[in-house]
Image (cartoon, coloured by chain):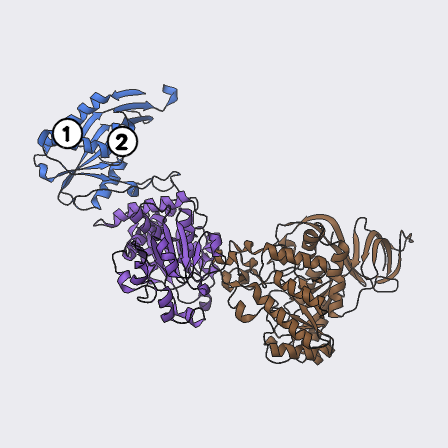
Chain colours: A brown, B blue, C purple
């Protein structure tokens, strides 16, 4: 297989390149990178004028649901959705059944992932920090790390015990694994289904106050200061207060990183009006002030990563009373388009910075090695069309589930293809 | 638009109806009027007033809102505003003179009879109308008629009363443009 | 005259004209309720289901009476606990309603938004008989009817809602309805039982009855539930009664008569003293009577809209 990627603009924050480049690829390996290459007839030309080549995107917060909840999503359908959304790598969360708290489950997911996508999407399991995600005993972290788990998290639940969180920091520091916290203090959040604020008062739904998130991040920062060499990553930051805590922690040199989801910067809690259960998300959609703070945090680097928190649920599971509906929406197939629309077209982030937040930084945080776009390295690309205007249609989703809030949204910019070694696909 | 009764004619008709009521009901003790909203109410009051002038006896007058009993209630784009029925006397064993302005298909009277029956069991109900214009769709006949007016279906009988319309008069309106 | 919406999901956003139409119509039905034969025929042939996923005998009986007096056919579906526990989802229930050709649904549920959910999936008119902590529109309508009878107009009337505002759908519906009608609404209760940002709904917040009593005409006293004590929202019924319980002694400080309302059932001598509940300024029984009239009006106006 010999390919000539012609006329595209290369955005590579790893090597600091932001200009037009042609790339020749032979059997999945980069042979040559130059401006205006003239190659012989044996190369298939892929003409990409006005398009962007970026290092392959990673979504570091995805629920693939397998094993255990294959009616919502499987590793195969989740990876197909990831590829269609422009990702060549995903990190999958351990709230499966069985929970990813055993090396056999880590290996099962790795193997299934390899088979499912023929190498197009790399699947990196995140292991539970505690046994069964019960928040009581340490998971076998050493074994999980050795099996290839890239991070630890009880996502969906908070590691509520301060003592246990300290021990997780200490134990994981031996392996350099980041601990990803779903920050939600359980007694403050108890029974809540949406942001606590004016809208919850109006709609009569129990609220999850922003302080439930902030108090956990504050506490974890205190612990982090005490435990040397631990790594801490805050999942799906949703409030202005959390942004402030992280900003201060970073200024003090703490090893803290953070992510935000595209939906938390696109929608506020006003969309809960009408009680569409797809608006039920954890952490909940907040307010305009929070969105403004999150955007600032993306701009100034307080937030490192954009991740989708892809949370598939079937229509029947979502089509119930608001208070009993499960939390979450799918995100893999809208993440890039939403991020480009809300952040790049508005000038909040440059495309270069977006690539950092969707490719470079997540890979750095979970320690899977940077994608090197240079001769002799494996090709691992996400192709973007920053001008493309399109309409989200849940019926075209590759994901098994359609629980999106963005059906019918007009977006500007999207991924048009992905390449990972010998595998590649263009969908536009 | 053709005038059928002017103010004077209308008053004369009411006077005559009052006389007829007295004549046919020797026992005024049991007599009571019930006017069907809206114009039947005012006609009932006028006749009762006339009887008071003639006999020195104030007969009770009630008002019946038949909205809830209409058979054309559902599917109407413009729902009639529901008003109260105000019958402050017991209808039981009374002779009720039901009063309306125009007798046409008979459906209004049917509704009124049902409504009245739900209030109790009168000894007898008699029907008094100002104008009978024919075209009955139900087996209903008035006991007292102010004026019989032969009409076509496309006609409308428009009764104006001082109390609400600022004028006393009865008109026949032809809605069929072709024939005009 | 017709209502803007074919469902009654809540009073938020309902126009002054629509509320007035319901209250005026209810007055006419009140007259019907005083007749020897209290039954009228306008909903003959209509089938109404009362879907009560949460126990409330009073509200259900009031609705049922209203329905029967309008000559509708009535089916009751009452289930304690969630329908999910019984293996039937709300969606299944909705589909059954469709299949049984039911014309109107009166629904009470512990989860806010269930009436909205039903209104999206069934063709029938949906009437909210209380959804979670959200709204209880017919209760607020009967409260407004009672107040309008007493004061002729709601414009400028000063009403204070006392007690557990946080968990009260009655409070929310009253706030939405009364503010639309031009009344001045305030709420009074312990800080733990007042939801955040409620002032944005156009009400003033008080934490001491003594502060608000001199400035109001009406006290609408809410029922306090003992389970709130267990969740740590107030220390004890004794303390609640002492500081937020409405007593003769406290309202006498107003030096003008204050009308007492309560949506029932009353915890006597907890949130409201017995002498006030049964006293000359109490309109609690009028509320119950008006409840049937208001529900007849709502059923009548919506039932004829199809």
Q: Which residue is mark 2?
A: B104
Q: Which mark is residue B50?
A: 1
Q: Is residue B51 left or right of residue A131?
A: left
- When the figure is inspected, residue C148 is found, relative to residue B159, above or below; the finding is below
Q: Secondary structure at mark 2?
A: loop
- Label 2 resides on the chain identified as B
Badge 1, how many Cα within 10 Å: few under 14, some, many 20+? Answer: many
Q: Secondary structure at mark 1?
A: helix
Q: Is residue C210 left or right of residue A66?
A: left
Q: Pick whichever, A403 or C227, lies toward us.
A: C227
Q: Position of residue A101 (x, y in %)?
A: 65, 77
Corner quadrant of residue C135:
bottom left
Q: Position of residue C185 (x, y in %)?
A: 40, 52
Q: Are marks 1 and 2 on the same chain?
A: yes
Q: Pick whichever, C214 or C163, lies toward us.
A: C214
- Label 1 resides on the chain identified as B
What's the CA distance linking mark 1 and mark 2? 26 Å
Sequence-first tag of 1 and 2:
1
Q: Position of residue C16 (x, y in %)?
A: 41, 44
Residue C264 appears in the figure: yes
């Amino acid at each position: 297989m010999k390919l000539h990627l012609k006329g595209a603009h290369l955005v590579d924050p790893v090597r600091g390149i932001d200009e037009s480049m042609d790339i020749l690829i032979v059997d999945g390996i980069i042979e040559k990178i130059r401006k205006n290459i003239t190659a012989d007839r044996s190369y298939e030309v892929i003409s990409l004028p006005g398009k962007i080549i970026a290092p392959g995107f990673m979504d570091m917060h995805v629920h693939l649901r397998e094993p255990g909840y294959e009616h919502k999503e499987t590793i195969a359908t989740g990876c197909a959705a990831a590829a269609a959304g422009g990702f060549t790598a995903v990190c999958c969360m351990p709230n499966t059944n069985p929970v990813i708290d055993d090396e056999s489950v880590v290996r099962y997911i790795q193997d299934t992932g390899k088979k499912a996508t023929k190498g197009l999407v790399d699947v990196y399991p995140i292991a539970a920090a505690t046994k069964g995600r019960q928040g009581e005993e340490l998971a076998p972290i050493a074994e999980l790390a050795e099996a290839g788990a890239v991070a630890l998290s009880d996502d969906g639940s908070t590691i509520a015990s301060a003592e246990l969180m300290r021990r997780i920091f200490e134990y994981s520091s031996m392996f350099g694994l980041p601990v990803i916290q779903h920050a939600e203090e359980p007694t403050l959040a108890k029974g809540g289904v949406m942001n606590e604020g004016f809208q919850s008062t109006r709609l009569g739904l129990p609220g999850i106050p922003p302080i439930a998130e902030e108090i956990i991040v504050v506490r974890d920062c205190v612990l982090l200061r005490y435990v040397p060499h631990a790594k801490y990553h805050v999942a799906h930051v949703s409030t202005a207060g959390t942004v402030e805590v992280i900003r201060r922690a970073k200024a003090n040199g703490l090893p803290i990183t953070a992510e935000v989801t595209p939906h938390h910067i696109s929608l506020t809690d006003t969309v809960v009006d009408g009680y569409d259960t797809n608006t039920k998300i954890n952490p909940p959609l907040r307010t305009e002030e929070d969105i403004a703070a999150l955007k600032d945090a993306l701009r100034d680097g307080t937030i490192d990563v954009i991740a989708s928190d892809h949370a598939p649920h079937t229509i029947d599971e979502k089509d119930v009373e608001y208070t009993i509906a499960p939390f979450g929406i799918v995100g893999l197939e809208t993440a890039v388009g939403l991020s480009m629309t809300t952040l790049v077209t508005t000038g909040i982030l440059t495309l270069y910075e977006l690539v950092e937040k969707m490719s470079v930084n997540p890979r750095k945080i979970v320690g899977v090695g940077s994608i090197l776009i240079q001769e002799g390295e494996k090709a691992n690309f996400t192709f973007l069309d920053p001008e493309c205007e399109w309409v989200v249609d849940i019926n075209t989703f590759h994901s098994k589930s359609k629980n999106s809030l963005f059906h019918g949204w007009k977006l500007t910019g999207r991924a048009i293809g992905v390449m990972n070694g010998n595998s590649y696909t263009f969908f536009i | 638009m053709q005038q059928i009764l002017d103010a004077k004619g209308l008053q004369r008709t009411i006077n005559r109806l009052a006389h007829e009521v007295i004549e046919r009901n020797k026992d005024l003790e049991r007599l009571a009027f019930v006017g069907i909203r809206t114009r039947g109410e005012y006609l009932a009051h006028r006749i009762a007033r006339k009887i008071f002038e003639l006999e020195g006896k104030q007969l009770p007058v009630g008002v019946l809102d038949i909205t809830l009993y209409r058979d054309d209630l559902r599917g109407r784009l413009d729902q009639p505003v529901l008003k109260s029925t105000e019958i402050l006397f017991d209808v039981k064993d009374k002779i009720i003179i039901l009063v309306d302005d125009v007798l046409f298909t008979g459906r209004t009277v049917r509704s009124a009879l049902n409504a009245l029956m739900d209030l109790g069991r009168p000894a007898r109900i008699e029907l008094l109308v100002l104008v009978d214009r024919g075209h009955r769709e139900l087996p209903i006949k008035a006991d007292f008629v102010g004026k019989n007016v032969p009409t076509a279906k496309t006609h409308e009988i428009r009764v104006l009363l001082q109390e609400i319309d600022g004028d006393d008069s009865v008109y026949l309106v032809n809605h069929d443009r072709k024939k005009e | 005259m017709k209502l803007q919406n074919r469902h009654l999901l809540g009073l938020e956003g309902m126009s002054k004209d629509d509320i007035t139409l319901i209250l005026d119509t209810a007055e006419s039905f009140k007259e019907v309720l005083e007749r020897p034969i209290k039954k009228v025929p306008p909903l003959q042939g209509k089938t109404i289901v009362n879907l009560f996923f949460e126990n409330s005998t009073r509200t259900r009986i009031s609705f049922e009476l209203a329905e029967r007096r309008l000559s509708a056919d009535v089916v009751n579906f009452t289930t304690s606990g969630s329908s999910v526990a019984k293996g039937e989802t709300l969606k299944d229930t909705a589909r059954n309603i469709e299949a049984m050709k039911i014309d109107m649904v009166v629904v009470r549920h512990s989860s806010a938004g269930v009436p909205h959910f039903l209104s999206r999936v069934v063709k029938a008119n949906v009437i909210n008989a209380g959804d979670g902590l959200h709204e209880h529109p017919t209760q607020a309508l009967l409260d407004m009817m009672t107040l309008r009878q007493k004061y002729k107009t709601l414009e400028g009337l000063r009403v204070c809602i006392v007690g557990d505002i946080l968990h009260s759908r009655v409070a929310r519906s009253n706030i939405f309805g009364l503010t639309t009608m031009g009344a001045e609404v305030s709420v009074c209760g312990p800080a733990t039982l007042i939801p955040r940002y409620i002032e944005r709904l156009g009400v003033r917040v008080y934490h001491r009855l003594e502060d608000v009593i001199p400035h109001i005409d009406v006290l609408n006293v809410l029922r306090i539930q003992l389970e709130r004590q267990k969740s740590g929202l107030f220390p004890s019924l004794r303390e609640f009664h002492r500081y937020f319980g409405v007593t003769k002694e406290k309202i006498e400080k107003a030096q003008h008569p204050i009308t007492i309302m309560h949506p029932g059932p009353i915890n006597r001598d907890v949130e409201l003293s017995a002498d006030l509940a049964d006293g000359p300024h109490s309109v609690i029984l009028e509320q119950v009577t008006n409840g049937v009239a208001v529900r007849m009006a709502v059923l009548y106006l919506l039932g004829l809209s199809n």
